[in-house]
Image: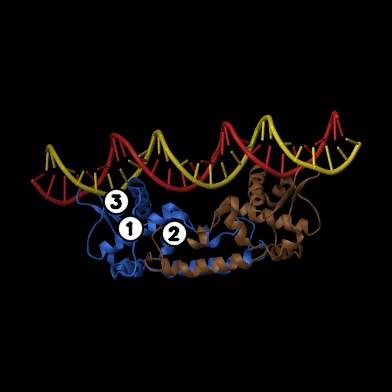
Chain colours: A brown, B blue, C red, D yellow
DNA sequence: TATAAATAGGATAAAATTATCCGAAATAAA
DNA sequence: TTTATTTCGGATAATTTTATCCTATTTATA
């Protein structure tokens, strides 16, 4: 569904959110250990999230990554997906046709439209806050 | 959503179905011109569909690809997707976790489950017949 | 101010996906 | 039986994605 980079990005953002709620900065090392991802690659993705102002970085000694507590509830999965994979997954044609649209649909256009719209709605209405809380409450997990 | 190979595979299968309804064999050349895909790559994908017994090939002079008329209605998109991309798109975890399941869910498990299930249902209930007819009726298109 | 710790970013490598090329095998028709 | 046509399949190349490595830059603290 999403690229590896995007999967890592989502997981990283959730983990940063959890820690930021406790006022704690986290490093790429801590993040990649927690979400089981390659460290250097994860660091690149974090830079991308910083560039898109989804997470913020504190450079230098005792630095790390964090997310402004006040914004954790307003950051939606859609922002992360869009930052890393773009929005083609819930905008583009199911068969990859540039020319496909409502008035000139591909054979699967209507079939996919419903699903893509739901995916879009879900991503736009799922916040880091919600996901961070489910982990903290022990209702969901990153690893075994 | 799907790989390029899978997009080509779906388009090719629809085009073959349309022609098979008229008892006509089609070549990789005709197919790739119609669906706007690289010919040699498309040929590889056709071989894969043949191996999975979704389309059948007639070798030698005056040969080509076809789909048994009687089966066009029973072949669903899910079979094509599964043959080319596998079923991870509507089975696997949204965050790529091997350990994710109903009893040990990842943070987005429930959110994705609904969508994946719908995608699965749609793919399993959309037949080549339906898609071929919509093209023949001029209600959908491959190209401009 | 010097040092250590941390992110930023460029260069490069590995792996997967997408794409091309060419000869072998099959087969219908001349 | 020969020829022309067509799929099959292996080898290879190009591109994209994933991943690693190394150095520069930043910055808190000693």
Q: Which label sits in the foreground, 2 or 3?
A: 3
The residue wearing badge 2 is B81
Q: Which labelled disc corresponds to residue B28? A: 3
Q: What chain is tagged by disc 2?
A: B
Q: Earlier in the sequence, mark 1 or mark 2?
A: 1
Q: Which residue is mark 1?
A: B55
Point 52% across, 68% down: residue: A117
Left or right for A26, reference B74: right
> What's the distance in space between the residues labelled 1 and 2, CA to CA?
14 Å
Q: Chain of mark 3?
A: B
Residue B129 shows which numbered tag?
Answer: none
* Residue A60, percent from left and from top: 77, 41
Q: Output the chain of dot 1.
A: B
Q: B138 or B100: nearer the eye?
A: B138
Residue A67, image quadrant: bottom right
* Residue A61 vertical placement versus B35 (above, below): above
- Structural distance between the alpha carbons of marks 3 and 1: 13 Å
Marks 1/2 in contact by CB < 8 Å: the verdict is: no
């Amino acid at each position: 569904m999403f690229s590896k980079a995007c999967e890592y990005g989502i997981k990283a953002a959730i983990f940063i959110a959890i820690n930021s709620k406790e006022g704690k900065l986290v490093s790429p090392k801590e993040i990649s250990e927690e979400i089981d991802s390659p460290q250097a690659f994860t660091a690149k993705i974090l830079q991308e999230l910083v560039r898109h102002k989804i997470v913020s970085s504190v450079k230098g000694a005792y630095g790390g990554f964090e997310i402004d507590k006040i914004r954790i509830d307003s950051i939606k999965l859609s922002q992360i997906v869009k930052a890393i994979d773009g929005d083609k997954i819930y905008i583009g044609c199911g068969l990859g046709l540039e020319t496909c649209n409502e008035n000139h649909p591909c054979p699967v256009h209507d079939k996919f439209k419903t699903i893509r719209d739901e995916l879009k709605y879900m991503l736009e209405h799922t916040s880091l806050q919600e996901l961070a809380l489910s982990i903290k409450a022990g209702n969901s997990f990153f690893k075994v």
